[in-house]
Structure formats: structure tokens, C-alpha cells
Amino acid sequence: MISSLWPGAGGAAQQRAARASAEARAASAVRPLASRLELEAELRACEAPGAPPLLVILSTSWCGPCKLLAEDLQEAAERRAAQRGGGGAGAVRIVKLDVEQREGGLAEVASALKVQKLPTLFVCGGRGAGKPALRTTGLLKRKVIDDLIDRSAFMGSDLGSAVLY
């Protein structure tokens, strides 16, 4: 309140908070993928020790529940990054595949993974875990999303043998 009356009061603290919030949003932004090769690169990066969890959303542009799930995942990732002090160890990577996109082989990925319902979410962890990834379909409650993100560090990155949740 004082900062609105006097520009010099609380300016540095507010700027640091705004910068941390912007970094958390950028680190957790849902990034659309254009090809199967990009997905494979993300999965390889996910297998590195200490890599942040990777959430893969299979959706379409016209699907309302798909849009809601993407927004909820981004908000959950932002909350996690803010709790852990920005990016780094608390970061979560979120990528989105449009299953109707013919270019880049994304429709074939959805077919190979036997995706029948949208949205479909794959949760992949890092640390080279040998366990398969987790697969969910449909909308999820925010508590479930938070729980999935917190536990994702112990999941593998094998989408083909993902455990259905």
C-alpha cells in the first residue's frame, strides 16, 4: 500500500517477487511440440539423473477438457516452482501434442500409444527410474495433479508401457 503512494518504498522486494513469479510461469509453460523427434528428445532429457519431471498431454485444439487440463497443470507447476523458489530443482516441464496434427508424426504417436480418450496425460520422471510412466485420461482434480507432480520423480519415461491410472 505504501509502495503505491511512494514509488521508492518496497520497490526492490516487489521487483524480486515479480521476477520470481515470471520465472516460475516461464519454467512451467505448456510447450506445444511439432514433431515426434521433439518428443523423443524430451523423453531422452527426462532420463538424465536429476532431470525435472515431464508431463506429456495428448489433446486436440477443439477439446475443452484438454484446455482445462493444460491450464490446471500449468498452475500446479507454477505453484510448485513458487514453493521451491523459482526454477531449478522444483521445475516441471509440460509439453502438449496435438493428436490431429499430421505433420511431424504426432498422429502416429497417438496411434502407437493407443490413445482413445482425450485428454490423455503421461507423467514421466527423471533419475533413470526403470519403472514405466503413468498414464491418465480425462480431467483430474487439482489435488491429484499436485500428487502426480510430486511423485513423478520416481517414474520412468517408457510411454509404451505406461501404467494406466
Image: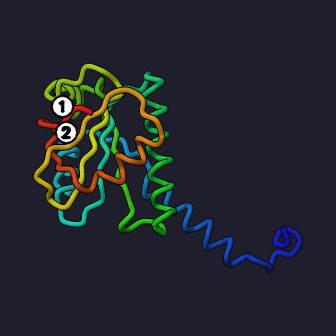
Q: Is 109 above or below relative to 158?
A: above
Q: Give the class, few, some or many, for how many residues have Cα within 10 Å of label 2's Cα (few <14, many ≥20).
A: some
Cα–Cα gap, marks 2 and 1: 7 Å
- Identify the residue position indicated by label 2 in the image: 36
Residue 123 sits in which quadrant?
top left
Question: Residue 7 in the image: x percent, y percent?
Answer: 82, 75
**Mark 2 or mark 1: whose residue is earlier in sequence:** 2
In the rendering, which numbered label is found on residue 109?
1
In terms of secondary structure, where does tag 2 sit?
A: helix
Residue 61 sits in which quadrant?
top left
Mark 2 and mark 1 residues within 8 Å of each other at the beta carbon: yes
Question: Residue 119 in the image: x percent, y percent?
Answer: 36, 28
Q: Which is more foreground, mark 2 or mark 1? A: 1
Identify the residue at image location x=42%, y=65%.
Answer: 87
Q: What type is the residue that disc 2 sits on?
A: Arg
Which residue occupies the foreground of this view, 122 or 45? 122
